[in-house]
Image: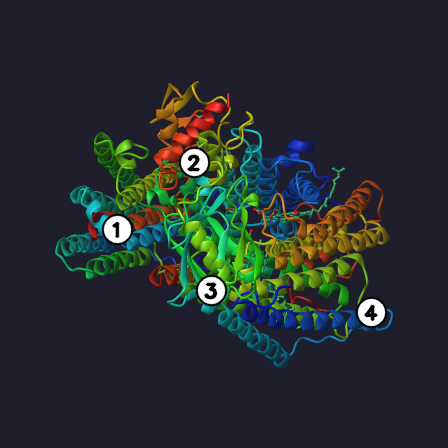
Amino acid sequence: MSENNHHISSYKDHLLVLLILIFLTVITVAITSIELGPFNTAAAMLIASVKAAVVLLYFMHLKFDHKIYRITVGIVLAIYAAVIVVTFFDYFYR
Amino acid sequence: MYSETSNFVNATDNAFFFIIGVSVIFLLGITGTLIYFIFRYNKKRNPVATQIHGSNTLEVVWTVIPTILVIIMFFYGWAGYSPMRKAPEDAMKITATARMWSWSFEYPNGIKTDTLYVPLDKPVALALNSLDVIHSFYIPAFRVKEDMVPGRGNKTWFIAQKEGAYELFCTEYCGLSHSYMFTEVKVLPQKDFDAWYAMMADTTRKPAESGNPVAEGKRLVEKNGCVACHSADGTKIVGPTFKGVYGHKVLVETDGKEREVLADDEYIKRSIYDPNADVVKGFAKGVMVSYKSQLSDEDVSKIIEYLKTLQ
Amino acid sequence: METTTHHEDLHRDDTASKLGMWLFIFTEILLFGGMFIVYSVYRYKNPVAFHIAHEELSIPMGFINTVILLISSATVAISISSIQKGDRKLTIRMLVVTLLLALTFLINKYFEWGAKFEHGMYPGSDLMANLSHGDMLFFSLYFFMTGLHAVHIIVGMILLGVSLYKVQKGLVHSTRFALLENSGLYWHLVDLIWIFLFPLFYLIH
Amino acid sequence: MAEHTEHKHEPNYLEYQGKYKGLLGWLTSTDHKRIGLMYFYAMMTFFLSGVVMGLLMKLELIAPGEQLMGAQTYNGLFTVHGLTMIFLFVIPGVAAVFGNLFLPIMIGAKDVSFPRLNLFSWYLYMIGAMVVLGSQFIGDGPPDTGWTFYAPYSLKTNTNVVFAVTGAFILGFSSILTGLNFIVTMHRLRAPGMGWMRMPLFCWTLYGTGWIQLLATPVVGITFLMVVAERTLGIGFFDPALGGDPILYQHLFWIYSHPAVYIMILPAMGAITEIVITFSRKTVFGYTAMVISSMAIAFVGYFVWGHHMYTSGMSSTARWVFSFITFLVAIPSAIKVFNWTATLYKGSINLQTPFFWAIGFIFVFMIGGFSGLVLGSLATDIHVHDTAFVVAHFHYIVFGGTGFAFFAALHYWYPKIYGKVYNGKVANIGLVIFFTGFNLLYFPMFVLGIMGMPRRYYDYLPMFHTPNIISTVGSWILAIGLIIVIVNLLRARKGSGKEIDNPWDGRTLEWSIASPPIVENFEEVPTVDHEAYDYK
Ligand code: HEA
Ligand code: HEA
Ligand code: CUA
Ligand SMILES: [Cu+2]
């Protein structure tokens, strides 16, 4: 599968990604410290998802690996999301 | 089996008949086809197989037809079920409370029974509660069932349409005496029901045992389901036996520490009102739950009188 | 998985190991996923209690730990790049830094939990038993989820420790780095989970 | 390529002597075939003990009132019976035994991708089994919660729940690792020319199963851990007295346990597909449809768990959503049944024991499946939920489905596994008795359920007496059939059968090699240049 494409990320890229992640963390803390009501949670979760995507794509190398990995990760996360949605069919409508 | 016993029977049974009907047709059809093929195309009759790789038309046909059938099944099921959720406004409201392993029904005028009495042809809405674990309220003849979940209410309703007595089971497994947690629904014509209702509400009428605290205590212990867990003859069931409790030392665990207490009035009362404060050694915490809402101080002292006699 | 990588060279299949690691990561995601479902349901049912309870947790502490984990993720990533480039020394150095960061994370956690314990707040304590229902759920989840996360940190440290050892022995090198790569993937997963735990427990209200 | 079978110079996997001899040689072996057989022996032991428990329960139920045992014993029995049958027999079931034995061979590989992990899974399985069964003897008595461990009863009861739940957790891990191993094997070790769409259909079902194992099992794992934490540490997750929501427990439990029923049935369907094909000497009807339906069952099956909870107090919206999806999941099963039937058309059917088992499977599976439709529909499930009807449904489909498929597969691959042939006539007689007993045992339970007899009932009202008697008598007939079947197979092993490499003219790769196979299956890895079932 991915035997032949040996993409090696440079150290600089890793550091850049790290900076972005820390920056996003600071933003989350800042945003959640002001009162935004329900958007609070939404914003925090959105940023966490962006961070997770960055980790997955760069640190975990999904961006450079064979696409089978990206597809399976996508499917797994989609199934998980669907499970949450279906669970909340119960809780939202009680 | 039953017909027209409640307002839900028809719709539910129609769904049954449709699903089972379709199923039987398919079952017989497919089984018949299999047997025919085995007969017609066995090695002796048909030594050389014809290779067929498939047919998209057929695949589509036998995907679409079952899909349509299945959607009709869904619809019947849903149509039969959806009225079960909405009790009419004018329904008579009864609270059903389950605990291990007894039932208690409370009527609008405050009386309590362990058998459910309902008037004929009148909607009855039940609020379902449980005090300890999950039970389930099931009247097969009426096609109603709903779980009784502790900590959150649940509800169900029905209109009984035929006079008589019907079984009422607990269908959610709830421990040792799950299979004995059963009682009856009695459907009375409105006139009889009203008479019964008035009689029960009449506080001036006393049961036969009144005046004899020991006998009344015994009746209370039986009526409130204590006997499901406590024997009077020394056998250990789920809880410690009542035999010889009163006046003896008991080893209990209080807040995780063991200690010995004398089973006096005070202790027995605490055991009934707050059973998890002192947990008798060798028994589980949380199995018995408080009877504070069911037994008055007076009741408890009668029970104590009764316990005194079991030495 | 560690057991999968040292076959005789005959059977060696790095891609298989990596695929296996990814599949294992999926199960870990669903493992924590189950808890996130519990968390979101209880948060939905007890919004006020969760709001108040979260203020008991120290944001700076959580923030520091988040940054620590992010840095450690970067160092692992660098160590994987460097082993591929053949820079063994840098690999070793980066792995040591990662392990130290992981240790710091655990020490922080220890103090954080310790402070709670001192206040009488620990699973099974009287204080906890007497909390309101929502608070009780919040702290039960807090201890359970961060506890399980800490277990994963320890497992990750073991994996990285083994990789470090093998790098030093020269058993893991620029053409044979599947073990390190997979341990790295696992470590990123641990980071990934924390990325969600941090806002859920410390920040949002 | 099935023709040339001049081998015999290499020892077969049964006789092979590695570093260790005898039992130790088996216990340390990473050969997938040996591991498969080790699963098989362990599983048969557990199955038979579960069977004896079932028999005891039926004896107790022959009449109202106490017959043999007290209520506590009965409650313990159905719990352990359920745990044994579900977690120790049918969930690993066909996949762990026949998947391990034949998946690598069928795709032309020498072993699975991670042989040691495979052995490790077996050990986890054994440890988990010991812990589950240990809960019988250690601590405060056998768990009495039912295999579902519903909160809050499972949090309150005095019995040994922690042990049983921990055991189930370990078993879950074993199952996850097996699934992982199979998926990677199929991705990496297919022989040259063996494209995805050339894999035998049994492999495809294992592929779908693997994904369910990976993605569903962890959810129940964590749920069980929470139960353990709640019982030992006294923290609240599911106990309403501490603010928890018992219905959430049910959600989490069924998020796993519904997909788990497809873990049980998918490989069984795969095995049946192989048998139907081989014995009609004809390529499968609708290969692609079979592949798609397998994957669809795996996928849709993930979203129907709520049909176990129609009466739990879930929101009405959730109830109809789950009901609707439940009906959709029946479609791919229907497709399979139709394709099996069509495969027979114009075949040249070889009437042998495995084929009869397969037909038996299709019949009882249909009855089980159709009763599933009754349960999937809201109005009717309200009536029969948690009654004997449900018990009948799942015995028909779990025992009737997976159990029948297990025996079908055993009779199908027996010559390959042992290089021996059993007595077909006796096997058929056993099957007929088994089949009769089976229907007598479980069909009355449908009637009981519709009459309203709840399940998990130690005692019942006299009105339920007659069907219960029939059912108990059925269990004895079933027992006789089972004994005949098993003794027949045991005798074949001891006795001197003819050695046969391809007794049924099968076209999948395992029939192209020696019986029993040599240690690494193939002397040289085959190259595949045709579709999965190339009958001419
Ligand atoms: C191998 C395991 C297995 C399988 C495959 C299934 C398959 C199905 N199950 Fe079953 N089920 C269990 C094992 C299984 N089940 C167990 C163990 C329980 C009880 C758990 C417990 O409480 O202890 C249970 C309980 C259970 C319930 C809960 C009952 C209750 O507690 O109230 C429901 C409800 O919807 C249900 C539905 C179904 C359906 C719709 C299918 C479908 O997948 C069936 C599909 C098959 C067919 C439909 C037949 C073949 C099709 C044709 C011949 C073509 C014609 C078809 C049409 C016209 C549609 N099952
Ligand atoms: C694969 C799954 C599987 C299998 C094969 C079986 C097999 C059997 N089960 Fe099943 N059963 C379950 C899975 C299974 N069960 C589950 C999941 C539950 C739910 C548990 C719960 O509620 O939590 C359940 C519950 C259950 C109940 C319901 C309990 C209740 O609700 O009150 C009953 C009642 O009769 C029962 C009976 C039987 C019987 C008689 C068999 C028969 O098949 C057994 C057939 C065999 C024989 C009749 C005997 C053969 C005898 C021998 C071979 C003798 C050996 C020889 C010597 C010792 C010399 N089972
Ligand atoms: Cu109450 Cu079962
Ligand atoms: Cu299900």
Q: Nearer the viewer, mark 1 or mark 4?
A: 1
- Real-space CA distance between mark 2 and mark 3, rounded to the nearest whole angstrom: 36 Å
Q: Nearer the viewer, mark 1 or mark 3?
A: 3
- Real-space CA distance between mark 4 and mark 3, rounded to the nearest whole angstrom: 43 Å
- Type of amino acid at the residue the image marks with label 4: Asn
Q: Secondary structure at mark 4?
A: loop
Q: Residues within 10 Å of mark 4 (few under 14, many from 20)?
A: many
Mark 3 and mark 2 in contact (Cβ < 8 Å)?
no
Mark 1 CB in 8 Å range of ligand 4?
A: no
- Real-space CA distance between mark 4 and mark 2, rounded to the nearest whole angstrom: 66 Å
- The residue beneath circle 4 is B42
- The residue beneath circle 2 is B288
Task: Return the chain for callout 4.
Answer: B
Task: Return the chain for callout 2.
Answer: B
Q: Residues within 10 Å of mark 3 (few under 14, many from 20)?
A: many
Tell me which label, 4 or 2, sits earlier in the chain.
Answer: 4
Quarter in which the N terminus of chain D is drawn = bottom right
Q: Residues within 10 Å of mark 1 (few under 14, many from 20)?
A: many
- Type of amino acid at the residue the image marks with label 3: Phe
Question: Residue C200 — which label?
Answer: 1
Task: Return the chain for callout 3.
Answer: D
- Type of amino acid at the residue the image marks with label 1: Leu
Mark 3 and mark 1 in contact (Cβ < 8 Å)?
no
- The residue beneath circle 3 is D322
Q: Where in the figure is residue B294, as x and y percent of width and height?
A: 39, 41
